[in-house]
Image (tube, rainbow, N blue to C red):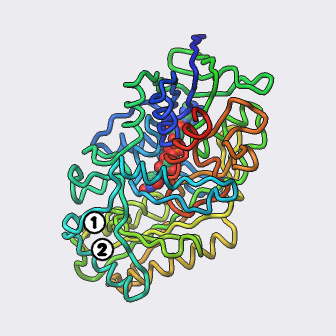
Amino acid sequence: MKEIFTEYVVVGSGPGGASTALELAEKGKHVVILEKGPRHPITKSKIDAYGIYDKWAVFSRSREGVIIDRAITLGGCSVVFSGNAFDPPPWLFEPWGIDLSPYATEISREIGIAPFSDAFCAPWTGIQRLREAGDRLGVDLKPQEKFIDETLCRNGCDGCMTGCRNDAKWTARRWIDKAASLGATVITEADVSHLEIKEGRVQAVHATTPDGKLRVDCESAVLSAGGVGTAVILQRSGIDKAGDHFFMDPMNVIWGMADEPVSTGTEMTFSYACDTWADEKGYILGNVSGKGAWLTRFMRPLSGWPALLQSGKWDRMMGMFIKVADDRVGSVDARGQMTKPLTDADLQKSREATDLAISVMTQAGVAPSSIRVVKSIGGHPGGTAAIGEVVDEDFRVRGIKNLHLCDASVFPKSPGRPPTLIILALGRHLVRHILEP
Ligand SMILES: Cc1cc2nc3c(=O)[nH]c(=O)nc-3n(C[C@H](O)[C@H](O)[C@H](O)COP(=O)(O)OP(=O)(O)OC[C@H]3O[C@@H](n4cnc5c(N)ncnc54)[C@H](O)[C@@H]3O)c2cc1C
């Protein structure tokens, strides 16, 4: 067994791990980052791209068949995320007196988060139709804030969720690489099995690597393996109360066709969104490119195959998505097996939002008989080690002095919007207020 020693071990290199590790490295701390995935190259091949996802995206499912996607790669899900930024809702950590918004603002400025410009969006006739239809129905599809530098982005590519080939999208790899340039040690393909805990302290983090077993002795550990991965490691380390209260923001994708061309077929997915009801009703909706929505139909291969018949008619297709903040009633066990029953409240929200999206699409010219809905795909796992339950208000695992968490597992409930900016801000809060004030 190989043994090393460090001040801080950070497990996971997604937004939570990258934010924490970079802050610590900037403060001169020695950090070892253990990441289960490799540094996958970003290529044009769709096969390569789906290999970045756990179980090729399509087969990562709860016992109930709900698809729950995550990436196992250096940079975590940010490598395949759609690049949308939402500010932390003030109510999320309010009961604990924690306000992440100053950090979110700071990070937003540093990364250059902004919506696409009007000039960039000008060719997209389909989204203009959806916006006009939305206006008539009271659905305000606003330009979406993006982690994307439009000067590098290839208009019409729409490949964010298979990895950005132009490096236009910010990913956590940038911050991991910066942490490494400041002295952090990054070990990829290090699958953390468990933590060795004695007398209320983490003594060492154990991982399996292609070269054999690795033991990292540490002064402190931060788990940022995501809403699923962190729950698994905690349970394998004897912290049995982790793993419950799982949410993942189920999304429906709605696809349809018009009888005549309605779009240039170059729209970028999630470039416009409506968050009017995010807090009050718990859902958001936005656009999906027609081709993107068509491709999503194959996520459910048994019902999706007839989509082949419409292949190529991209200028007649339109798409939208809805995402709901689901109840925290699922679970993740020590093997990573997930349960995600959708409650009556989840299904009611989902129906209401889907009906709204369908009204917008039909107003925009989509034939109602063509519409298909691909249901329940989640990509925001969290809640499995919630604040006030598994961790205290310092995001420290109760009963263990030197173990903190930084990912969506600590969220008390779904924030009802994509969480990356919130998680990045959490990393800054953790280091600047708690670990190294
Ligand atoms: C297709 C898709 C699109 C998305 N779009 C958006 C979007 O537009 N905006 C947004 O805000 N969010 C989006 N998300 C969600 C967002 O990407 C995640 O919420 C975010 O990346 C979570 O960050 P994290 O660091 O907590 O976890 P992750 O990004 O999941 O990173 C966790 C890391 O830990 C590693 N790990 C897991 N287990 C172990 C282990 N045992 N040992 C070592 N390492 C381990 C994983 O390999 C991974 O690299 C999207 C997600 C998906 C899947």
Decide: marks 2, 1 in contact (CB < 8 A)? yes
CA gap, disc 2 and disc 1: 7 Å
Q: Can residue 373 be seen? A: yes
Left or right: 218 with respect to 78?
Answer: right
Q: Is residue 160 above or below residue 293?
A: above
Of callouts 2 and 1, the N-terminal one: 2
Can you give x and y, in whole percent of width and height, for residue 182 in the image?
A: 40, 24
Q: Residue furthest bottom?
A: 136
* Residue 435: quarter of image: top right
Residue ID for mark 1: 267
Q: Can residue 70 be seen? A: no
Mark 2 Cβ and ligand 1 under 8 Å apart: no
Residue ID for mark 2: 127
Q: Residue furthest front?
A: 437
The C terminus, quarter of image: top right
Can you give x and y, in whole percent of width and height, for residue 159 in the image?
A: 31, 52
Q: Please name the amino acid that badge 2 sits on.
A: Ile
Classify mark 2: helix, strand or loop: helix
Residue displayed at 52% across by 31% down: 36
Residue displayed at 40% across by 47% down: 80
Report the front residue among 7 and 132.
7
Classify mark 1: helix, strand or loop: loop
Residue displayed at 71% across by 23% down: 196
Can you give x and y, in whole percent of width and height, for residue 16 in the image?
A: 52, 41
